Image (cartoon, rainbow, N blue to C red):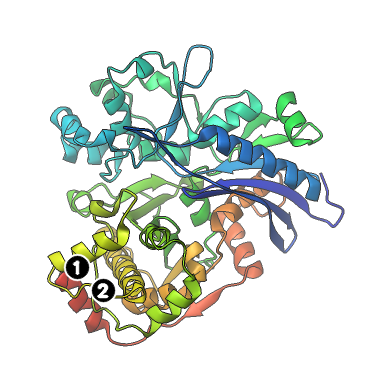
Amino acid sequence: MSTGSGTHAYAAVDLGASSGRVMVGRVGPGTLHLTEAHRFPNRPVRLPDTLHWDILALYAGVLDGLRAAGRLTPLTSIGIDSWAVDHGLLDAEGALLGNPFHYRDTRTEGVAERVWATVPAAELYARTGIQYAPFNTLYQLVAAQGTAQLGATQQVLLIPDLLTYWLTGTRGTELTNVSTTQLIDPNTRTWDGELARRLGIDPNLFAPLRHPGEPAGHLLPTALAETGLTGPVPLTTVASHDTASAVAAVPARAGERFAYICTGTWSLAGLELDTPVLTEASRRANFTNELGLDSTVRYLHNIMGLWLLQECLRDWNEPNLTQLLSGAAESEPLRSVVDASDPAFLVPGDMPHRIATACHATGQPVPKTRAATVRCVLDSLALAHRRAILDAQRLSNHPVDVVHLVGGGARNALLCQLTADACELPLIAGPTEAAALGNVLVQARAHGDTGASLTDLRTLVADTQPLKRYEPRGAPEAWRRAERRLGRA
C-alpha cells in the first residue's frame, strides 16, 4: 500500500527487556526512514517465588502501538521481534497457561548439571553450538518437567510467535529465534529431535518452522477492531530474535571484514560467519552459534551489557545520566574493572554494591563515587568487548578490520570511544534502532521494496542512517594490564 511518496510503510514491533516500541519504517528507492509511533514499558512482575513477564501488558502495548502507527500512515505489513529463549505454554485449546517466566528467574539453578548427566556439555555444544547460559530454553523446559503446567502443555511458542498467534490466529516458530533454544542443529538448521527426546522434551511441542520473509497470516477481525486498522493487514515473519534483526541492519559495506556489537541490556559481540564453530575451544570460551538472516551464523559472546548501568541508575533513583557520564569521562581510566559476564550480576537489585564487592574481591580500589562506578562499568564493558572480538577472531580464524556498534549503546560516546580503544580498531557507531531497522528491511524485501541480497539491505542502512566513526587511541598495554587483573592473559 503506497504512502503517496513512492515509499511503503512497515510497522516494526520491537520488544526489549525493559521496553517495547512500535516503529514505522518508510522504505523506497534510496529511502529508509524510521519513526517511533509508540513506546511502552516492559516491567517484569515478581511473585513470592518466581519472576515473570507481564505478557498481557506487552500485548496491550503492541495493540496501542499499531493503533498509533495506523494513524501515521497505511501499513503494508507488520513484523515482530523480541529477546530470545522465553516462551509461552499453550493448552489443547490454544489458551496460555500462565504468564511466561522471565529468563532471570532462578528456577533453572542447578538444572544444567542434570542435563549434562544425560548429555555431556561437550556433546551438547557439538550438536547445537549454543553457549551455556542458565536461562536457555532447554534448561527452562527441563526445569518445568513434572509440573502440572508443562503436563497440560500442547505447544510452546517463543515470545514473538505467541504475539503473532494472538494477532493472526496462526502458529509458527521462527528460525533465528528458535536457534537459541539449544534444540536446533546449526548445520541442518532443523530440530535435533533425538537430542530433545533424550532429555524428555517432545519436539512436537513446537510449531512448524518459519523463515524470515515468509507470510505469517493477517490481522484477525478482533485485532483490526482493537487497532482501528483497515484490513487486510499481513504479518511478515522477520528475523524475530532482536539480535538477528540488529545484525541484519549492521551498515557494513560490500567486502568489509567486520565485527559487531549489539548493545542494550545485553552486549552481543561477535562475527558473522557462513558456518558454525563447534570446537571444544569455542565451547570453553562460551561462544554461541545462533542462526542469522540468509543462512548466516551469528558467532558471538553474551556480555551483561548496559544492564549493569541500568541497574545502578535504578538503585540511585534515576539520576542525571548526562552528568554522570561527564563525571565518568573525567574519572581515572581503568582504575577498577569487573568481569561483565559474571553471573553474579545477572539478577536485579543492589548493583552498585555488587560491583564494589567484585572490585574488592580482586584487590582493586572500590569506586567511591557514582561517577567512578559508572566509569568502572563502561571500562569493564569495553574490556569485555575487546576480549570477545579478539576471541571470536582467534576461534574462527576470521580477522576483522572494523567494529560496528549498533543499538542503544551507540548513543553513549564514552562507551564507543572506550570500545574502539580497547579493541584497537576503528569503530562505527549506529544505527541506534538497528533491531527495528532490520525488522523493517526484512519486511520490505519480502514485499519487493529493496534489493534481494543482505549486502543490499546493509548498503541502504549505510547510505541513509546517521553514523559516527571513532578511531582507537593509544595505550593498548593498559587494557592488557586490566585483563590480567581479572586473571586473563
Residue where numbered disc 1 is placed: 359
Vertical order, 146 against 451 (above or below): above
**Mark 1 nearby-residue class (10 Å; few <14, some 14–19, many ≥20):** many
* Image side of residue 344 versus residue 451, left or right: left
Residue type marked 1 = Cys
Q: At 31% from the left edge and 56% from the top edge, which residue is drawn?
A: 350
Taking depth in this image into account, of 150 and 115 the one nearest to the observer is 150
- Number of labels in the image equals 2
Vertical order, 110 against 351 (above or below): above
* Quadrant of image for the C terminus: bottom left
* Image side of residue 465 versus residue 321, left or right: right
- Mark sitting earlier along the chain (2/1): 1
Taking depth in this image into account, of 163 and 310 the one nearest to the observer is 310
Q: At 47% from the left edge and 15% from the top edge, which residue is drawn?
A: 91
Residue type marked 2 = Pro
The residue sitting at the right extreme is: 4
Residue 240, x across and y down, in percent: 52, 42
Residue 131, x across and y down, in percent: 28, 46
Which quadrant of the figure has residue 427? bottom left
Which quadrant of the figure has residue 227? top right
Q: Regarding mark 1 in the picture, which secondary structure is present there?
A: helix
**Mark 2 nearby-residue class (10 Å; few <14, some 14–19, many ≥20):** many
Vertical order, 154 against 326 (above or below): above
Q: What is the C-alpha distance between the residues marked 2 and 1?
A: 8 Å
Q: At 17% from the left edge and 41% from the top edge, which residue is drawn?
A: 122
Residue where numbered disc 2 is placed: 367
* Quadrant of image for the N terminus: top right
The residue sitting at the front extreme is: 317
